[in-house]
Image (spheres, rainbow, N blue to C red):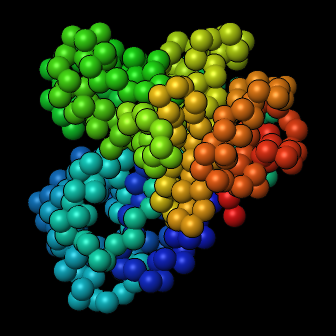
């Protein structure tokens, strides 16, 4: 098993909170992590029909099976359990007693907010990030190799081929699980929606244009996007609203949680094809944005991430707001440093008063430097600000 960054933080919090919840995309490694962290806990997977029936029909008896702690996987399938868990942890007063995991975040978080507020610590486990692969033999040698493959664990520790993993993933997760969350009357339209979203990575999310292209209403686009977000398929990056006396874009940008899945949806099957694809730069940008967000999530933190763009087209790809400090990032898919790579960072520094040591250029090359305008960071050395 490849160690996960989230491990130490979960162990620490398990000493302080009675219930732990671990959410994330299907196949992100939640079950493996839970079993490794809590090997002596009773494990129950509610995707199994018999186990689910037991939990639904006799929740008290189901929970009484445990001798110590209990891991309940895909807990959202038995919503009444959450109230019984609440009563039991209030009675025992023990920390780390229950671990609840789920991949359907909408249903999962709804139940938690109804029953377990103040009793639960929430963690998000995303697919592997580069920091988790650096000390393993699985670290990709090239940036676009990682963009194409993405970070789902089975692609690494079990060496599953891309053309085997992703078709099965889309079939079982995007088509089956997402349809359970909303009444998608026309599956073909929904599949088209997901693929068109992949083609809009790194772009402003224009609901009207997408609705017109598919032939659906804007409320439907909004509802389906929310579904992708709560299911850890895609997310929107909000704009940074501070004005700086300029007219700013107020529309969010769209990204995927995993670039490997996005490449598959775009029909990109190998690295050579990716290198000449129109979405090459956007996919590299997506990879960097998600890598920085993973590092926050896997440290138990919530990333405060934004982008900035004014009406003249000047843009900062990513801004991390750490409260007292702002950290702008410019992302370039080129492998050779060019002077113009720094133009927007220099402009933003003059506008926002951001120090050069807080500014970073991340690119697809292999050099790490400190320039007068920004720190230069290679694709395989991406790190959040300390």
Residue located 27% across and 82% down the image:
89
| Quadrant assignment, res 331 | top right
| Quadrant assignment, res 92 | bottom left
Residue located 57% across and 67% down the image:
324
Is residue 296 something one can see in this rendering? no
Query: As drawn, which residue projects farthest toward the left?
Result: 57
Q: Nearer the viewer, residue 210 or 6?
A: 210
Q: Is residue 347 left or right of residue 18?
A: right
Residue located 57% across and 42% down the image:
318
Q: Position of residue 111 (x, y in %)?
A: 21, 60
Q: Is residue 6 left or right of residue 241?
A: right
In the image, residue 1 above or below residue 339:
below
Q: Position of residue 186 (x, y in %)?
A: 19, 16
Q: Nearer the viewer, residue 202 or 160?
A: 202
Q: Position of residue 337 (x, y in %)?
A: 84, 29
Residue located 71% across and 26% down the image:
333
Q: Nearer the viewer, residue 205 or 364?
A: 205
Which quarter of the figure is the C terminus placed in?
bottom right
In the image, residue 366 above or below residue 208:
below
In the image, residue 71 above or below residue 235:
below
Q: Is residue 375 left or right of residue 298?
A: right
């Amino acid at each position: 098993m490849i160690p996960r960054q989230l491990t130490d933080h979960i162990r620490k919090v398990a000493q302080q909170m009675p219930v732990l919840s671990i959410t994330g995309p299907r196949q992100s490694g939640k079950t493996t992590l839970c079993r490794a962290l809590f090997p002596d806990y009773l494990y129950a997977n509610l995707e199994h029909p018999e186990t689910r029936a037991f939990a639904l029909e006799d929740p008290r008896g189901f929970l009484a099976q445990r001798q110590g702690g209990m891991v309940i996987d895909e807990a959202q399938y038995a919503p009444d359990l959450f109230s019984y868990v609440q009563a039991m942890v209030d009675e025992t007063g023990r920390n780390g007693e229950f671990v609840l995991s789920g991949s359907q975040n909408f249903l999962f978080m709804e139940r938690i907010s109804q029953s377990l507020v103040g009793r639960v610590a929430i963690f998000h486990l995303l697919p592997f990030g580069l920091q988790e692969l650096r000390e393993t033999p699985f670290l990709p040698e090239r940036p676009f190799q990682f963009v194409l493959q993405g970070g789902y664990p089975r692609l690494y520790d079990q060496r599953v081929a891309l053309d085997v993993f992703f078709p099965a993933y889309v079939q079982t997760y995007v088509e089956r699980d997402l349809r359970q969350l909303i009444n998608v009357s026309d599956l073909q339209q929904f599949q088209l929606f997901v693929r068109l979203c992949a083609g809009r990575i790194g772009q402003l999310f224009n609901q009207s244009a997408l609705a017109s292209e598919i032939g659906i209403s804007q409320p439907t686009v909004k509802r389906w996007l929310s579904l992708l977000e709560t299911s850890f398929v895609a997310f929107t990056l909000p704009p940074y609203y501070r004005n700086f006396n300029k007219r700013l874009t107020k529309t969010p940008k769209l990204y995927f949680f995993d670039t490997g899945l996005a490449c598959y949806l775009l029909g990109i099957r190998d690295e050579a094809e990716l290198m000449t694809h129109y979405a090459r730069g956007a996919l590299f940008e997506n990879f960097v944005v998600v890598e920085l967000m993973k590092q926050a999530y896997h440290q138990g933190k919530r990333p405060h991430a934004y982008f900035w763009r004014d009406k003249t087209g000047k843009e900062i790809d990513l801004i991390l707001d750490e409260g007292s400090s702002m950290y702008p990032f410019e992302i370039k898919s080129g492998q050779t440093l060019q002077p113009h790579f720094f133009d927007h960072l220099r402009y933003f520094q003059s506008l926002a008063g951001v120090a050069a040591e807080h500014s970073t250029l991340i690119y697809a090359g292999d050099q790490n430097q400190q320039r007068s305008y920004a720190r230069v960071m290679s694709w395989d050395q991406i790190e959040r600000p300390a």
